[in-house]
Amino acid sequence: MSQPEILNQAFELGYTYTRSTGPVVGRFLTELRDRNIVGIKASDGRVVVPPMEYDPDTAEELSEFVSVGQEGEIVTWAWIKEPREAHPSEQPFAWAMIKLDGADVPMIHWVRADGESEVSTGARVRAVWADETIGFMTDINGFELV
């Protein structure tokens, strides 16, 4: 019994377009490049960091930027005992929800600590800036305990 011929064709998947970050995310990233952190005021007055283009409750377009602090408080966290290759640190660290001073909605980032026992809900942290900032979220190279 003969085998049917297997047909194949070389194929390369590619994305031939680029996407603009737009006025809200673009402003956020530009501010990071300049070592500043901004949020945006939602329709109910809450300050959201990172900023979003539309209000999560009303779908209203948002445009009022607000400067927030580079320090904040850990709202909740999870310890990463064995970082993987894709993680931001080769050393154990914490993923944390951090409510920056002047913000009402916490953002997720990573926290440097020598051990799990140093991290706690309510602990104060400060942004650590990358040596070279380029307008990416990684311009904040984690947070350190204050």
Image (cartoon, grey):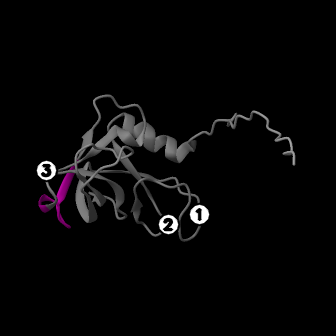
Q: Quadrant of residue 137?
A: top left
Q: Position of residue 91 (x, y in %)?
A: 22, 45
Q: Nearer the viewer, mark 3 or mark 2?
A: 3
Q: With 143 as the anchor, is 5 left or right in this view?
A: right
> At x 47% / y 53%, what residue is drawn?
64
Label for residue 114?
3
Q: Position of residue 83 (x, y in %)?
A: 30, 50
Disc 1 residue crowd, few under 14, some 14–19, many 20+, Cα 10 Å: few
Cα distance in 3D space between marks 3 and 1: 43 Å
Q: What amino acid is found at the position of numbered circle 1 in the picture?
A: Glu
* Magenta stretch, residue numbers: 117-126
CB within 8 Å, label 3 to label 1: no
Q: What amino acid is found at the position of numbered circle 3 in the picture?
A: Asp
Cα distance in 3D space between marks 2 and 1: 7 Å
Q: Is residue 106 above or below residue 129?
A: below
Q: Which residue is mark 2?
A: 43
Q: What amino acid is found at the position of numbered circle 2 in the picture?
A: Ser
Label for residue 60?
1
Give the total of numbered labels. 3
CB within 8 Å, label 2 to label 1: yes
Q: Is residue 77 above or below residue 128?
A: below
Viewer-side residue, 38 vs 50: 50
Q: Position of residue 76 (x, y in %)?
A: 27, 67
Q: Residue furthest top?
A: 132
Q: With 146 as the anchor, is 102 left or right in this view?
A: right
